[in-house]
């Protein structure tokens, strides 16, 4: 049995949580492989909206095992609140949630470092969620981080204080206020005690055992491909590998065990935080798109930057991830437009036309080259099959499919899990 991978192809917020929820009945295991509480996966069913930050999106299906892999950075405080918030749904966390002992822990001073780094950048700030993600991954790569398994060690407090001392030295350089640290630490250690009651495992063995036994495993990514630490719009990126290879390193699964790679994209584009965004709209169309799509960050609440779909960027993500199937989300947001624009190329400052993301795109301003197509300009709320789509929407899907050279197998026409049309 091979492990399938599901990830976003744009700058995040593509709707991965909903797709995992829809696909989940086909799988026995859903495993999160990277990122941290800076990600927010939104699911909606039975008229209720659910936002998950660290827990895999298969948690609402009682027969599915959910694994938080070693590639994730975990905040015990946020995880505790997340679990407590789901108690009313009678989810059996002791039965179906497992956490890798090798996952890295976010400690209170990581958040303070995040805030101090961002403040020091001034106008050049990244747009961090200030959840401590970057500093935690820095410590991981620097080989000084604490991991989930460490909380079971009798000298955990000693290890913790050693790392905090390193952080205080850095924070003193930035003259950062530490008055809130004591309160943050009290909450943190309370959450650590709760953490000890959960299923802490060597998850790489578990995932490979499930595959060997013939169980179906779905690897769930966070953020989006264009925020990848290596291949995203650096330095305006996240601190982990958001591409498909991250599923191998973030779960301990060999590349030869990867099966389908599901790529999710919106029918348009959004981005949270700073960084290049060639098709960003600053006019009434962009504002209408934001309002219609309720484009506000599920983790931060920040307004998302909105723009037309970007084919060069999508082709890039599809190529690097080896995408085998595409899922188009939030087609209903474009209901309000009589005409829709599709970016097919970029025009560089010297007049050169390109259809690829080159290194220079992060440092020079490019002009999107658009093709305009008719919109469907009608509601999709009552449509339950692809045959019921208006011709203009079918033409839009066909155009994208031809340009991207990968089949579009799913089209979402609303937030509820029922408003997901399979082709």
Image (spheres, rainbow, N blue to C red):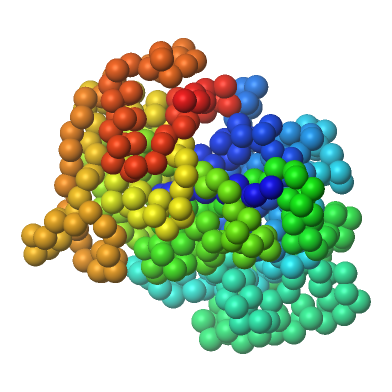
User: Can you give x and y, in whole percent of width and height, for residue 418 in the image?
Assistant: 57, 22
Q: Relative to residue 395, is residue 220 drawn left or right?
A: right
The residue lying furthest to the right in this view is 154
Q: Residue at x 43, y 19 (%)?
A: 386
Q: Residue at x 39, y 41 (%)?
A: 406
Name the foreground residue: 191 vs 225: 225
User: Can you give x and y, in whole percent of width and height, for residue 347 in the image?
Assistant: 15, 56
Q: Residue at x 44, y 68 (%)?
A: 230
The residue lying furthest to the left in this view is 351
Q: Relative to residue 92, is residue 292 drawn left or right?
A: left
Name the foreground residue: 296 vs 53: 53
Q: Residue at x 65, y 49 (%)?
A: 2
User: Can you give x and y, in whole percent of width and height, for residue 304 in the image?
Assistant: 40, 46
Residue 378 versus residue 196 in the image, above or below: above
Residue 231, image quadrant: bottom left
Q: Is residue 42 visible?
A: no
Q: Is residue 223 visible?
A: yes
Residue 274 versus residue 163 in the image, above or below: above
User: Can you give x and y, in whole percent of width and height, for residue 129 in the image?
Assistant: 52, 58
Residue 74 versus residue 386 in the image, above or below: below
């Amino acid at each position: 049995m091979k492990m399938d991978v599901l990830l976003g192809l744009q700058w995040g917020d593509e709707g991965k949580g909903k797709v995992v929820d829809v696909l989940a009945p086909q799988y026995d295991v859903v495993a999160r492989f990277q990122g941290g509480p800076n990600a927010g996966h939104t699911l909606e069913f039975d008229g209720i909206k659910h936002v998950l930050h660290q827990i895999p999106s298969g948690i609402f299906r009682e027969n599915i095992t959910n694994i938080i892999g070693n590639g994730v950075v975990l905040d015990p405080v946020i995880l505790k609140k997340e679990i407590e918030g789901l108690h009313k749904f009678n989810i059996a966390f002791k039965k179906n949630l497992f956490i890798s002992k090798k996952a890295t822990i976010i400690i209170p001073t990581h958040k303070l470092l995040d805030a101090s780094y961002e403040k020091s950048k001034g106008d050049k700030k990244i747009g961090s969620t200030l959840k401590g993600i970057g500093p935690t991954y820095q410590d991981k790569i620097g080989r000084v981080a604490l991991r989930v398994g460490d909380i079971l060690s009798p000298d955990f407090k000693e290890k913790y204080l050693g790392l905090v001392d390193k952080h205080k030295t850095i924070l003193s350089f930035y003259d950062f206020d530490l008055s809130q640290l004591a309160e943050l630490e009290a909450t943190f250690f309370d959450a650590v005690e709760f953490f000890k009651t959960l299923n802490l495992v060597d998850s790489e063995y578990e995932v490979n055992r499930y595959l060997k036994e013939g169980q179906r495993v779905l690897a769930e990514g966070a953020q989006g491909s264009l925020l990848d630490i290596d291949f995203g719009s650096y330095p305006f990126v996240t601190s982990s590998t958001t591409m498909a290879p991250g599923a191998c390193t973030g779960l301990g699964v060999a590349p030869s065990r990867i099966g389908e790679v599901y790529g999710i994209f919106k029918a348009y584009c959004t981005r949270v935080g700073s960084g290049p965004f060639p098709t960003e709209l600053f006019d009434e169309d962009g504002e209408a798109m934001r309002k219609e799509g309720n484009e506000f960050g599920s983790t931060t609440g920040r307004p998302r930057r909105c723009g037309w779909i970007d084919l060069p960027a999508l082709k890039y993500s599809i190529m690097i991830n080896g995408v085998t199937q595409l899922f188009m989300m939030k087609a209903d947001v474009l209901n309000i437009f009589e005409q829709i624009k599709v970016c097919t190329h970029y025009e560089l400052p010297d007049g050169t036309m390109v259809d690829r993301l080159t290194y220079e795109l992060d440092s020079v301003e490019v002009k999107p080259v658009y093709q305009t197509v008719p919109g469907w300009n009608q509601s999709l709320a009552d449509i339950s099959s692809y045959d019921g789509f208006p011709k203009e929407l079918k033409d839009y899907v066909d155009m994208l499919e031809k340009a991207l050279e990968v089949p579009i197998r799913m089209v979402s026409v609303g937030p509820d899990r029922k408003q997901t049309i399979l082709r």
